[in-house]
Amino acid sequence: MWSELTADTPAARAVEAELLARWAEPHRRYHDRAHLRAVLEALDELGATREVRLAAWFHDAVYEGRPGWDEERSAQLAQALLPRCGLGPESVAEVARLVRLTAAHDQVRPGDRNGEALCDADLAILASPAYDAYASAIRQEYAHVPDEAFRQGRAAVLRRLLAVPRLYRTETGHERWERAARANMTAELTRLGEACAGAGPRPPGGAAVPAS
């Protein structure tokens, strides 16, 4: 709960209201309040500091379907709003750093427990029985991208994730989610390959598609 992470002041409540409004924007199909709740629930399983939980609130607060740009703007939003909530400069800087890590999920350094927890929680959906619904929602958010360009971009993301020796960095995440996530992503990659096989020649390039 937001109220457990910041001072109970009018300014902090106003920040919470702004964040909730952002997470409820009508163009969102996956990166919505349900995703925010899911990340926070995953952090309950993993254990997390206040800064990690605040980073969860901010990590997709700006979402326009522009990977990298969205995370940077979300980090800047955290830097602008969190001082109003009573956080000191070091905590604000840590939240912003964590938000930026979610742009690619592969920049977490060994021993960065905060970064490991946030990225694992953000990727927990990959192991979910609701994976197909998640993948469908991602496609809806990128409805403006032609099918073949989306398939190429999405397949590139899945191949990159499957190539890493360990998708989840925390012990809990690795034990609970690794096997199911790899099975889900492999199945989607197979479907994408089958769709591409029947689509004729591929245009160059592909859409930038987020991992989660």
Image: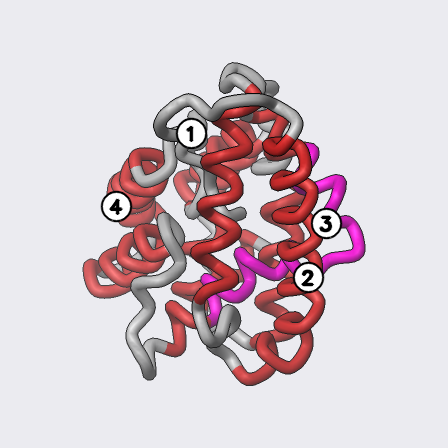
The boundaries of the magenta stretch are 117-136
Q: Nearer the viewer, residue 131 or 162?
A: 162
Residue 28 higher or lower than 112, as above or below: above
Amino acid at the residue labelled 1 = Ala
Disc 3/disc 2 C-alpha distance (Å): 7 Å
Q: Which residue is mark 2?
A: 127
Q: Which residue is mark 4?
A: 79
Mark 4 neighbour class, 10 Å CA radius: few under 14, some 14 to 19, many 20 or more: some
Are the residues tagged 3 and 2 within 8 Å (C-beta)? yes
Label disc, if present, on residue 207 of the rendered structure = 1
Mark earlier in primary sequence (1, 4): 4
Mark earlier in primary sequence (2, 1): 2
Residue 3 higher or lower than 84, as above or below: below
For the rendered model, the colour scheme is: secondary structure
Mark 2 neighbour class, 10 Å CA radius: few under 14, some 14 to 19, many 20 or more: some
Q: Position of residue 206 (x, y in %)?
A: 41, 30
Are the residues tagged 1 and 4 within 8 Å (C-beta)? no
